[in-house]
Image (cartoon, rainbow, N blue to C red):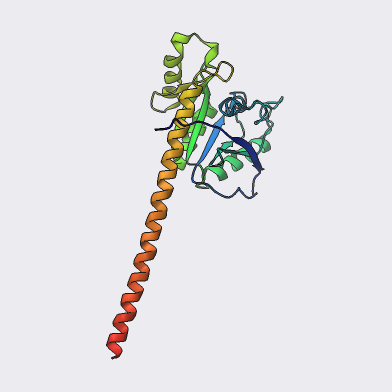
Amino acid sequence: MKQFAINQAKFVTSVGQGQTYPAPLACEIAVVGRSNVGKSSLINCLTNNGKLAKTSQTPGKTRLVNYFLLNNAFYLVDLPGYGFAKRSKDEQTEWGNLIGSYMSSGRPKHLLLLVDIRHEPSPEDREMFRWTLHAGVPFTIVATKADKIGKSQRVVAANKAAKLLGAPAFAIPFSAEEKIGKDALIERIGQIFADAEGQAQRAAEQELLFASAELAFAEAEAQENDETDE
């Protein structure tokens, strides 16, 4: 089986509250986390493009849902960061409405929830995880900044962060700077994409089956009516 790889990536559009999302694809993977957890760096690392996702000089400034098309086949979606202290209550409400609308839209097939491997998950991290569970979106925990701790501690610290979050005790240690965990995360994305494609194919086959059954039933009913008339 050919190993999955990310060979192409391009920015598609940014979507604000109440605006229209791009045409759906079979797979849409969202990336979410605190404003300084390294979402943009992760996206740029995965796509081998240091300029694809712009890193804001002011954490928490981005208030849009940013869509990237990978391999001309699926979306990687950068959600606005949370937990930045300088945001006003109105801005926090705006963030909540934007994220809430997206999470309940039925579009995300999987969520990459980023946490800082060095610190215990914040109340905002736990709240985001609760939203994920409420929306019923499958997830993978990614523990960023893994290069900041010793190599022997990374797996234990990553799994501990996931457990403290309230998730099963498994997370992928990751560092965009040293590309730690890059291969593992790309492999995980490949699995998510394959599963989503399989589900879409099965749904299309089921839809075709029902359409064929309805047509056959209508034809049989019409024939029965003709015979009754005779």
> Is residue 68 or residue 136 the one in the foreground?
68
- Residue 109 x %, y %: 47, 41
Check the picture and name the quadrant holding the C terminus: bottom left
Location of residue 116 in the rendering, given as x and y in whole percent from the top left corner? 53, 20
Q: Where does the N terminus fall, quadrant-wise?
A: top left
Image-based side of 95 in relation to 210, left or right: right
Give residue 67's position: percent from left, percent from top. 61, 40
Foreground of the two, 142 or 206: 206
Relative image position of residue 162 (x, y in whole percent): 44, 24
Count the marks.
Answer: 0
- Residue lying furthest right in this view? 57
Residue drawn at 60 percent across, 26 percent down: 48
The quadrant holding residue 63 is top right
Can residue 65 be spotted in the picture? no
Q: In which quarter of the image is residue 77?
A: top right
Question: Which quadrant would residue 206 be assigned to in this image?
Answer: bottom left
Give 191 or 150, whichever is nearer the viewer: 191
